[in-house]
Image: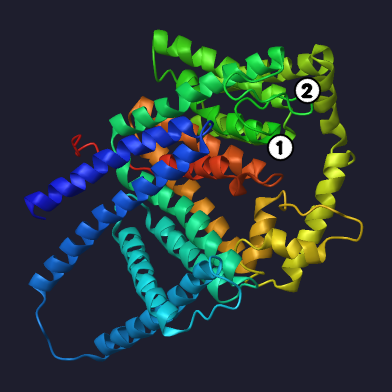
Amino acid sequence: MSVQNSRICSGCDKFIEYLLYTIFFFISSSKSVLEVFATIAILLWFVKKSYELKERIRVKAASYVPGPPRLRSSAAFILMAIVTSVMVYLTIVVTIGVVSKHVEPGYNLLSPAAFIPIVFAAAILLTMFYVIISSVAHSCDLDLNLKWASVGYLLVSIVTASITTSNITLSSGTLMFKTMEYFLLFLVITDVINTKEKIVRSAMAFVLPSFIVGLDGLYQYFSGYDLFRHFPLFERIKVTATFKFSNSAGTFFATVLPLPLSLFMLNAVRGKAKVFLAAAILAIFASLMLTQARAAWLGFAFAFVFLCVVSGNKRFYALLAVLLLVIALLGVAGPQSLRGQIGSLASIGKDASSRDRMIIWETGWRMFLDRPLFGHGLGTFMNVFERYRPAGYGEIVYAHNCLLQVAAETGLAGVLVTLWIAAGMFISGIRGYFREKDVLVKAVSIGFLGGLLATLVNSLFDTNLYSLPLAVLFWSVAGLSVTKIHYEQPEN
């Protein structure tokens, strides 16, 4: 690569890096920062990857030696032509779906005045898809299994947003402005955060605001309102901190808590830093309990057991005994509302919240059974739910089970690629943990993996992956849990 192009890519890398730190810091407090900074980071990543792709093409062209025609080469050419034709069709369909939301009903999008710009926009979209797939294929930061899972996830999302959907407008918008943005954020993180210094800065960009939000949750519990947005206690008893709902706050705390916990228990830091981590753990854990979010409690419990088993550190087991004792004491002598919520764990499934979820899950299951292969279309759950909901049930809601919602929207194909990419993340992250020698990096790695598990377990009972800040949280933690450290690579 030329010196000028190398400087452009290096500059993009550095700019993206600090945009990512800002995103991590503001996950709990500002949706506008997440949207704007994530968009800029993704656009810069496309600039960088376009230069890298151009360089790969130049090198291949320079080394190309024409040879006699072969059957294998002809078959590959025909296959590429077919795939390209299909992708051209799909990108035009997706573009029409996105545009149709912003025009008057009945407007003819196939007229030359409208269709020519649509084809031009589809060409740009097709180029973006090619850059993404090429970047995944040539990435040295993703395991082979995770590469295939990523491509499968991308292709199933495109198909269920364009061909099999029952509402092209909803599905195309969801694909372009939600699914793709979150997935691209994951790719950007794995590509850019690749040195020890960067992973440590990323960890601090999570721990510091989490500590502040934890303190805000405690302040809210005693004052009745949170400090930053003046949000009241949810239902007058449950902590929300900087979030509108207690379940969202619980998901955030359960996802971030494994990180400072692993850093503290594995002795990855010393002195004042360890005192800071202890304070952060106490504040975050206390706020997590005060959210009274049972699914978040369960997610953190799975994450904690995961930390115990994978690390093999005896301190975790001692801390587990202490936590169980604390929870038991809270169940006996804690605030009345907290005692009731802890006690309700023994009768889960019988309370009003559980019964409501059972109704939603039953409806979602019927939606899946009606279209089991590719579902009703990406992002269409709430739209289709209205037709399936039981008589007398007045609400239109999310599935409160992200895997079930994936099944209803994208069918068995979507479920399989979702499980595949989740398994690929864990396999890649655990391999990286045992391969790593640096204690600090190991602690950060297992902390993010624990947070990833907490969110996934929690998502079986809630709508986490369909909330902007929590979806950004999940894909950020996912990217940081599988990132590979390049020790030979100097700081830009």
Q: Residue at x 55, y 27 (%)?
A: 257
| Vertical relation: 157 (above or below) 313 | below
Residue 345 is situated, as x and y percent measured from the top left of the image, at 82, 32
Quarter of the picture holding the C terminus: top left
Kindly identify which numbered label has been placed on residue 295.
1
Q: Residue 322 is drawn in which quadrant?
A: top right
Residue 323 is situated, as x and y percent measured from the top left of the image, at 67, 19
Display coloring: rainbow
Residue at label 2? 237
Which amino acid lies under the numbered mark 1 shown in the image of this protein? Ala
Query: Relative to the observer, which residue lies in front, 287 or 261?
Result: 287
Density class for disc 1 (Cα within 10 Å; few <14, some 14-19, many ≥20) is many
Q: Is residue 373 left or right of residue 122?
A: right
Q: Is residue 143 left or right of residue 11?
A: right
Question: Is tag 2's residue or tag 1's residue first in the polypeptide sequence?
Answer: 2
Residue 438 is situated, as x and y percent measured from the top left of the image, at 33, 28
Q: Residue at x 9, y 50 (%)?
A: 4
Q: Residue 284 is drawn in which quadrant?
A: top right
